[in-house]
Amino acid sequence: MQLGPLDINFILQILPNLLLGAVMTIKLTFFAIVFGTLIGLFVALAKISGIKILRWLGGLYTWVIRGVPLLLQLMFLYYGLAFAGIVLEEFTVAVIGLSVCGGAYIAEIIRAGILSIDKGQMEAALSMGMTYSQAMRRVILPQAYRRLLPPMGNEFITLMKDSALVSVICMTELMRAAMLLQNATFRPVEIFVTAGLMYLMMTTVFTTIFDRLERRLAISDGD
Amino acid sequence: MVKAENVRKSFGKLQVLKGVSLEVKQGEVVVIIGPSGSGKSTFLRCINHLESIDSGNVIFDGQPVGFKQLANGKVMPVKGKELCQLRSRIGMVFQRFNLFPHMTALGNVMEGPVTVLGKSKEEARHLAEELLAKVGLADKAESFPSQLSGGQQQRVAIARALAMKPKLMLFDEPTSALDPELVGEVLSVIKNLASEGMTMIIVTHEMGFAREVADRVVFMDEGKIIETGTPEQIFTTPRHPRTREFLSSVLRGYEKVPYPQVG
């Protein structure tokens, strides 16, 4: 069966392999988002804290990670650490690399979100006798959260696409699955069109979820 | 109740408070007036340590707010739990309300009792409903701040501060951000509080209100207290030329329609 330049039968043949890759991509993205957001939150809080050394460490972290290609970071983590005698599983390296990298960008997003909240909100919370962390949790972060959604959605999509880079450390996710099939069959059109559509479907799910969340918040917000 | 001794505070090179001393007794209403930039708001914010002080002392209810002296004579800044505990007994109302926009009016008032005092939701809701009724907003409990007028928001803010059962209330220009027609409703709430015997320090530009509600009026200029006296004395026979100058410039509008004498 032929659809334009695409051989549908061949696509059905390679589909199981690509789907397995896509599942791995989803797994990687999921872990990268969870850990990246946690790292990002703590680094953002460090960067706005009153403690100089924390601010400095946070600044160093975002400076290095945002200033060095992710590809290099992954290579360094995988080959560099192995060279130094620390051998980590591909999956572990991939998750660490992606979350550390995502964390740096997410930290900047969260920091900007927190700083965009009117200073009077923190003052009002403190004047009631709240501790700094109570004020953050009850007053500042819930408000920052609304402003964070659009750039966070963006960052999550970027993370999902960047996960393709872990193919260089032999992690068989969607991109590497496609490359392996290409090497074995030399049929790039079917393979990359199918893989591309799979990426597109996954990112579309993200955009849809975030659009919904934004709309729901806009309604409950009242302003 | 509150005693400030020789409080000094600088922002960079600019010295905003040049040794301010003031004592406020329980149940007293002190109104601070003065030109903008005179340091009155900064002084107010030093009392609950929203601004740290460079030197001097602030004692609230027998406890030091800025710095405390340890047994060995060392001076330590008061912070952490101790500071939060102090602050929870001092209510503050801001010029720009600073209500939490993601909570309803009721939620705003319940927040302190639940989060800081650890009261049950049930108990806090009861108290919050009571206080909203007291400021005349029982029907707005479920409204978000963005759905309320400035005057209503400020009244919710007062209820929010009262929910902590404070021993002292600080008002930082509570009506300066309001449209003129909404000023009255906020002032009348504050007047009611005064008549209930609440200890208050109020920074305001509303001279008529100052005259009516104050037990004592403090005139500040350039980071210092220039003159203190009863409203009668300050407004009719100010001793210091700077006070006279300031009053004549702000009271010009009142000359045509004299403020009704109270009491």
Image (cartoon, rainbow, N blue to C red):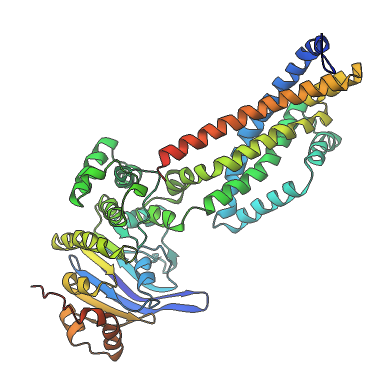
Residue B1 seen: no
Establish if A186 lies above or below B100.
Answer: above
**Which residue is at the front of the view, B67 or B18?**
B18
> Which residue is painted at 69% across and 32% down in the image?
A160
Number of marks in picture: 0
Establish if B247 lies above or below A222.
Answer: below
Q: Residue pushed farthest left? A: B263
**Which residue is at the front of the view, B202 or B96?**
B96
> In the picture, which quadrant includes the N terminus of chain B?
bottom left
Place residue A56 in its image quadrant: bottom right
Q: Is residue B16 left or right of residue A194?
A: left
Q: Is residue A66 left or right of residue B219?
A: right
> In the picture, which quadrant includes the C terminus of chain B?
bottom left
Residue B217, percent from left and from top: 23, 76
Q: Is residue B198 left or right of residue B118?
A: left
Residue A52, percent from left and from top: 60, 58
**Which residue is at the front of the view, B259 or B59?**
B259
Residue A178, percent from left and from top: 82, 22
> Which residue is painted at 82% across and 41% down in the image?
A72
Place residue B230 in its image quadrant: bottom left
Residue B189 seen: yes
Q: Is residue B131 left or right of residue A13?
A: left
Residue A181, percent from left and from top: 86, 18
Place residue A208 in its image quadrant: top right
Establish if B61 lies above or below A44.
Answer: below
